[in-house]
Amino acid sequence: MRTAFEAWAQREGHITRRREDKPEEYLVYETQRRWVIWQAALTHGAKAAAEAPSKFAKEPQAAAVTQDEAAVRNRVLNEVLDAFSELDEAAGMEGVLKVIQGLKKKQKDVAEAKA
């Protein structure tokens, strides 16, 4: 999981050097913050997959992720990270919930516009 994150972070121009005194943490705060968000997103995805296994079940001969799918995933991840970057450090949990609600509202608006 960390290898995938570091590959993505380097492509996006982030510094992935780790602290010498705490090798599990990144030297640059922004990279560390994105690592925490990355882990939270994967944990959330794993919980969703566990709750609805048939929805996320892989087909026996599942194709590899296409470039289009990878681009969409990258775009969505960047949208989430941008939304969280606008958070004030003093906002706390209320700020996080406000960002999540804003993302859900944006997603709902887009879905309604397509319908």
Image (tube, grey):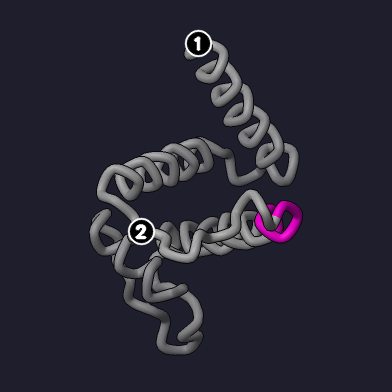
Q: Nearer the viewer, residue 97 or 86?
A: 97
Point out the tag, 1 or 2, that comes first from the N-terminus: 2
Question: Is 99 on the left or on the right of 15, as rendered?
Answer: right
Mark 1 or mark 2: which is in front? Answer: 2
Q: Amino acid at mark 1?
A: Ala
Residue stretch in magenta: 47-52
Q: Name the element at disc 2.
A: loop
Our reading of the magenta stretch's main secondary structure is helix
The x and y percentages for residue 81 are 46, 45
Residue of label 2 = 63
- State the separation of the CA atoms marked 1 and 2: 30 Å
Q: Badge 2: few (under 14), some or many (20 or more) residues near its Cα, within 10 Å?
A: few
The x and y percentages for residue 33 are 50, 59
Q: Nearer the viewer, residue 22 or 64?
A: 64
Mark number for residue 113? 1
Asked if residue 74 lies in the magenta stretch, the reply is: no
In which quadrant of the rendered view does residue 104 lie? Answer: top right
In which quadrant of the rendered view does residue 101 lie? Answer: top right
Residue depicted at x 47% and y 57%: 34
Q: Amino acid at mark 2?
A: Ala
The x and y percentages for residue 42 are 57, 60
The x and y percentages for residue 51 are 75, 55
Q: Badge 1: few (under 14), some or many (20 or more) residues near its Cα, within 10 Å?
A: few
Question: Is 59 on the left or on the right of 5, as rendered?
Answer: right
Badge 1 vs badge 2, beta-carbon distance below 8 Å: no
